[in-house]
């Protein structure tokens, strides 16, 4: 099949274009994008589309850029295509530390192209990815431990981005350019083996092809299957999330616990990732973070919490799982006496005090039991102060509250929102954590004070 027919087939199969669109072509001067420019120029009248092109200067190869721009201008002029040039600054971007130079360049390049597409009223952005790019991306994501979404490789279409060459082999592209005597420039960075993609291209793929000569088609086909299955699972996840969402805002998402507990892990994992993505980028959220959240959903206690990257806190309340980046409020001071309920809105809890004559052992994180005669009433509920200390029950030794929070891995931004219940100047209970052993009941205790905390809906 002729290369033009293969591209038309891909466009039709993946519904890339319907006619009448303005298409912005990403043009670097390299063989893939030059091939894309030539083919789209040849097909534009038949497809009923308008085309223009954009060149992005990343500022990474200043000695090569002028020649690339000159070539792109010449190619576009010969084909009656408008060319737009844009510059981005990659080296100084904070994304380099997070994603590496190539990753940052890609992110900034896509952002710049999208801005130009919007400014020019372009309906679609056409990029020159092909089967070899697909295979390289598959292997990179497999090495990095990506899930099904990553192993799905490069989609033929995503939002307004289309990839008309996605069904072509690199050899077909090179042959097309050679037979039509079309000039192009090879990017020298594509030969630099400090980049993982280049090492995979030059070292790993040739070795794998010795085992399976049809490797490129095999991986491309598997990526397509995985993409279809991934899309199906994402559709199920979307329907599931409609049932799970209780409340959501830019800083807070609440998910109903009961339906989540019984979800299959494959859907729950996706639902949690999608919920987090409502408030922060997923880049820094790891597989283990998600597994910890699943554990909290399925077997965590009410009040259990996790601290995730990017300031994300996850709290298991009675009926919902809260995922939030909201900063906790600083605690006010409250008074607590026998047979009282005190609502501590800043902490989202209610503390109750009840007197009892029945022997009761010191409780869990949500309950503390004291010898009433050892306490001075009324009790005070407040935030921590510098120098606060207590004797954690079962520990036997004095410990600063600050050190206790560090040992318990309590996030810094949460420490001032954790209520301390005090008898005079003595901390008797770090609510939700541990009580002071000095005030615990013993074999002589006849008068007990039971303090309980429970989460309230904010």
Image (cartoon, rainbow, N blue to C red):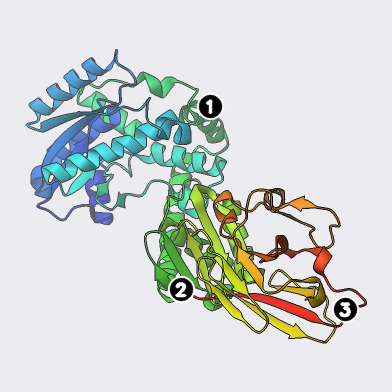
Q: Residue at x 82, y 82 (%)?
A: 447
Above or below, 26 relative to 410: above
Q: Quadrant of residue 253?
A: bottom left
Q: CA distance from mark 1 to mark 2?
A: 46 Å
Q: CA distance from mark 3 to mark 2?
A: 47 Å
User: CB atoms at circles 1 and 2 under 8 Å apart?
Assistant: no
Q: Is residue 83 left or right of residue 210?
A: left
According to the picture, the residue beneath numbered tag 1 turns out to be 203
- The disc, 1 or 2, on the residue closer to the chain's N-terminal end is 1
User: CB atoms at circles 3 and 1 under 8 Å apart?
Assistant: no
User: Is residue 21 at all visible to an observer of this figure?
Assistant: yes
User: In x, y percent, where is residue 151?
Assistant: 48, 49
- The disc, 3 or 2, on the residue closer to the chain's N-terminal end is 2
Q: Report helix, strand or loop for mark 1.
A: helix
Which residue in the rendered view is the most extreme toward the top? 63
Q: Nearer the viewer, residue 42 or 151?
A: 151
Which residue in the rendered view is the most extreme toward the bottom? 357
According to the picture, the residue beneath numbered tag 2 turns out to be 244
Q: Nearer the viewer, residue 31 or 29?
A: 29
User: In x, y percent, where is residue 421?
Assistant: 67, 66
Mark 2 neighbour density, 10 Å: few (under 14) some (14–19) many (20 or more)? many
Q: Which mark is residue 445?
A: 3
Q: Residue at x 48, y 64 (%)?
A: 271
Mark 1 neighbour density, 10 Å: few (under 14) some (14–19) many (20 or more)? few
Q: Residue at x 79, y 59 (%)?
A: 392
Q: Nearer the viewer, residue 100 or 367?
A: 367
Q: Report helix, strand or loop for mark 3.
A: loop
Q: Quadrant of residue 394?
A: bottom right
Task: Please name which of the two marks, 3 or 1, marks the residue nearer to the observer.
Answer: 3
User: Is residue 270 at all visible to an observer of this figure?
Assistant: no
Mark 3 neighbour density, 10 Å: few (under 14) some (14–19) many (20 or more)? some
Task: Please name which of the two marks, 1 or 2, marks the residue nearer to the observer.
Answer: 2
């Amino acid at each position: 099949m002729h290369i033009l027919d293969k591209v038309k087939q891909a466009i039709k199969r993946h519904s890339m274009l319907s006619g009448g669109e303005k298409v912005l072509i990403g043009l670097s001067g390299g063989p893939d994008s030059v091939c894309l420019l030539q083919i789209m120029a040849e097909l534009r009248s038949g497809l009923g589309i308008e085309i223009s092109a954009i060149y992005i200067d990343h500022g990474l190869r200043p000695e090569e850029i002028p020649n690339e721009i000159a070539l792109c201008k010449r190619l576009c002029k010969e084909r009656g295509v408008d060319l737009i040039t844009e510059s981005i600054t990659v080296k100084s971007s904070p994304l380099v530390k997070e994603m590496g130079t190539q990753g940052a360049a890609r992110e900034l390049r896509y952002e710049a192209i999208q801005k130009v597409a919007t400014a020019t009223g372009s309906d679609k952005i056409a990029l020159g990815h092909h089967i070899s790019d697909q295979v390289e991306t598959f292997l990179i994501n497999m090495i990095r431990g990506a899930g099904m979404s990553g192993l799905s490789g490069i989609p033929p279409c995503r939002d307004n981005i289309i990839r008309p060459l996605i069904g072509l082999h690199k050899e077909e592209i090179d042959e097309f350019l050679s037979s039509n005597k079309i000039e192009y420039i090879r990017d020298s960075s594509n030969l630099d083996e400090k980049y993982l993609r280049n090492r995979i291209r030059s070292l790993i793929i040739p070795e794998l092809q010795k085992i399976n000569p049809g490797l490129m088609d095999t991986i491309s086909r598997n990526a397509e299957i995985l993409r279809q299955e991934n899309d199906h699972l994402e559709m199920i996840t979307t329907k599931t999330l409609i049932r799970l969402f209780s409340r959501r805002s830019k800083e807070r998402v609440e998910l109903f616990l009961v339906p989540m507990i019984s979800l299959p892990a494959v859907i729950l994992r996706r639902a949690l990732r999608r919920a987090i993505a409502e408030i922060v980028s997923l880049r820094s959220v790891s597989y283990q973070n998600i597994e910890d959240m699943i554990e909290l959903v399925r077997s965590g206690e009410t009040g259990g919490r996790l601290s995730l990257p990017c300031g994300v806190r996850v709290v298991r309340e009675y009926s919902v799982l809260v995922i939030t980046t909201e900063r906790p409020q600083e605690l006010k001071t409250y008074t607590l006496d026998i047979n009282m309920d005190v609502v501590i809105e800043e902490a989202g809890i209610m503390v109750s005090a009840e007197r009892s004559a029945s022997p009761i052992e010191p409780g869990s994180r949500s309950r503390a039991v004291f010898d009433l005669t050892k306490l001075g009433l009324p009790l005070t509920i407040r935030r921590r102060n510098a120098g606060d200390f207590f004797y954690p029950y079962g520990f036997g030794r004095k410990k600063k509250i600050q050190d206790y929070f560090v040992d318990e891995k309590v996030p810094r931004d949460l420490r001032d929102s954790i209520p301390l219940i005090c008898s005079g100047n003595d901390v008797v209970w770090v609510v939700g954590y541990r009580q002071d052993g000095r005030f615990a009941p013993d074999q002589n205790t006849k008068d007990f004070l039971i303090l309980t905390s429970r989460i309230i809906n904010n």
